[in-house]
Image (spheres, rainbow, N blue to C red):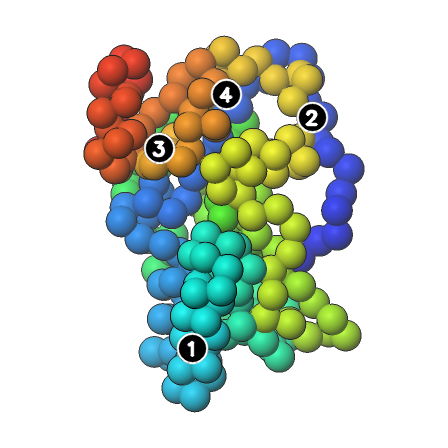
Amino acid sequence: MMPDEEARISFPDKTRLAVIDLDGTLLKGMNAERVFYLHLLVHGRVGLVRSAVFLMSLIGDILRLGFRRTIATNARILRGETPGAVQQWAHEFGRVFLRKAVPDDLRGKILSLKQEGCRIVLLSGSLQVLVDQLKERLEAEILIGTDLEVVEGKLTGRKKGIFPYGRMKVEALFQKIDPGGIDWPSSWALADRKSDLPVLELVGHPVAVHSDRKLCRLARQRGWEIFG
């Protein structure tokens, strides 16, 4: 669930990838992690007191560290839980919401890329346990998310490792795979925000999916495919 650093995955020469974002792309206008926390609250997995403490810590960290760094590090709502419990909750969340939230037409496009020979990679700043829930629905081979820190069998409420956002998405990708065997000009990337440009510009077939205005405008200027 929350693995230690592993050796990079190597592919045969000329392998094609389809690198796909989660929040806002597969989930139009939604952030999987925030919806997951709401799911936990609604279903009584975490109490109101813990949720209130989490929100207070979130606000304090935003004022102290800034929004992006806070989102990259703060998971205090899960503090003290076991990895097994959170994995079970994530599986339930995937079954009742996450897998159904991916539109059928977008899933169809992704599966068509798979049929054409692309290896499907999910690359997201959301929690790894949430990204993992889409493995079967999208027939993904590589799933890259944000890991949770565990000390003495309990979650600390902190995240660890690279937070895949902006240019760090490429770093997280290259930490997981060896880029040497990839046919990047024939590969695809699907994303929704201008902050995803480092990944979109890495491939020969970038696709703006459910995109914000900035990315949509840029996609039109560059002649990129626009989906949704």
Cα distance between the residues tagged 3 and 4 = 14 Å
Q: Nearer the viewer, residue 48 or 101?
A: 48
Q: Residues within 10 Å of mark 3 (few under 14, many from 20)?
A: some
**Residue 144 occupies which quadrant of the picture?**
top right
Label 3 sits on a secondary structure element that is: helix
Q: Earlier in the sequence, mark 3 or mark 4?
A: 3
Can you identify the residue that label 2 sits on? 178
Q: Earlier in the sequence, mark 4 or mark 1?
A: 1
Can you identify the residue that label 4 sits on? 202
The spot of residue 78 in percent (x, y) is 54, 73
**21 sits to left or right of 169:** left
Give yes or no for contact between labels 3 and 4 (Cβ–Cβ under 8 Å): no
| Res. 123 in view | no
Q: Residues within 10 Å of mark 2 (few under 14, many from 20)?
A: some
Q: Nearer the viewer, mark 4 or mark 1?
A: 1
Give yes or no for contact between labels 2 and 4 (Cβ–Cβ under 8 Å): no
Q: Nearer the viewer, mark 1 or mark 2?
A: 1
Q: Earlier in the sequence, mark 1 or mark 2?
A: 1
Label 1 sits on a secondary structure element that is: helix
**Residue 223 occupies which quadrant of the picture?**
top left
Can you identify the residue that label 3 sits on? 194
* Amino acid type at mark 3: Lys
